[in-house]
Amino acid sequence: MTGEDELKLLGTWASPWVSRVKFALHLKGLSYEYVEQDLDNKSDLLLASNPVHKKVPVLIHNGKPICESVVILEYIDDAYGTIGPSFLPLDPYERAIARFWVDYIDQKLVIPWKVAFTADGEEEKTEGIKQMLAAVHTLEGALKECSKGKPFFGGDSVGYVDIALGGLLGFLQGTEELCGSKPFDIASTPLLLAWVERFTALDAAKVALPDVSKLVEFAKMKRAQMALSIKK
């Protein structure tokens, strides 16, 4: 990477959204500067780069900030279309289908997971887990449909949907300890279970995904902090 093409990523080590972007950058073979952020004491650079949401990830390309993980993924694919694998297929219909499933992941999998993780009562937690497992079951069918018997949602190689779901794997793999439920198992989601093994074996995943046990301890600490703040 030259001074004429400078990439800087603002993130936090535990963020699944940042993991998505890290994975994409490594998959493309792009060099970048990573700047860890403290979201309890937000930097001037973060506030100036993402004044609307004030959140990570933010990718800064030659001084211009791009925010939101899925927007960043598409930007990387567009800006570096001739470098490394493409994330989105060329066919407009297949691109639309990929975008549909990425939106589904963020709306129907992530939101119930957050409910299950942060729920005060058992009933709310149970409902969150129920919705999360229903979404995982639907994604099992989506993997069968999108992959057409090949290793990934994107077919022979990792695509947009793989990156979007794969970035969440640290938290999803820690769900049994954090929420008391296992999202992937051989009986109900054999395709996804095999997909998880393939995805986490990729070099880009080894770089981008945080250690699950470290992530679980961090999440427990955050949950305890949230509980204390509610009681005050």
Image: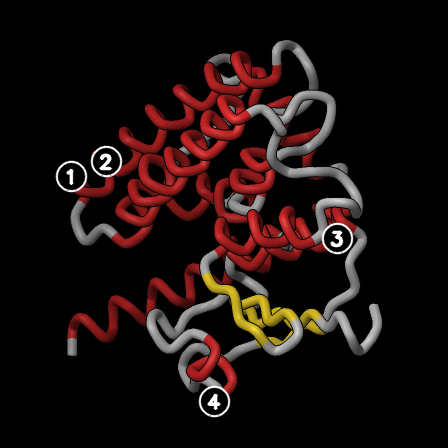
Q: What residue is shown with label 3?
A: 26
Residue 155 located left or right of residue 143: right
Q: Which mark is residue 44?
A: 4
Q: Which mark is residue 126?
A: 2
Residue 60 in view: yes
- Residue 143: % across, % down: 54, 19
- Residue 132: % across, % down: 34, 33
Q: Is residue 193 above or below residue 164?
A: above
**In what element is the residue under mark 1?**
helix
Kind of residue sitting beneath label 2: Thr
**In what element is the residue under mark 4?**
helix
User: What separation in Å lies between label 3 and label 4 (alpha carbons)?
Assistant: 27 Å
- Residue sitting at the far right: 2
**In what element is the residue under mark 2?**
helix
Q: Residue at x 75, y 70 (%)?
A: 5
Residue 67 located left or right of residue 132: right
Kind of residue sitting beneath label 3: His
Q: Residues within 10 Å of mark 4 (few under 14, many from 20)?
A: few
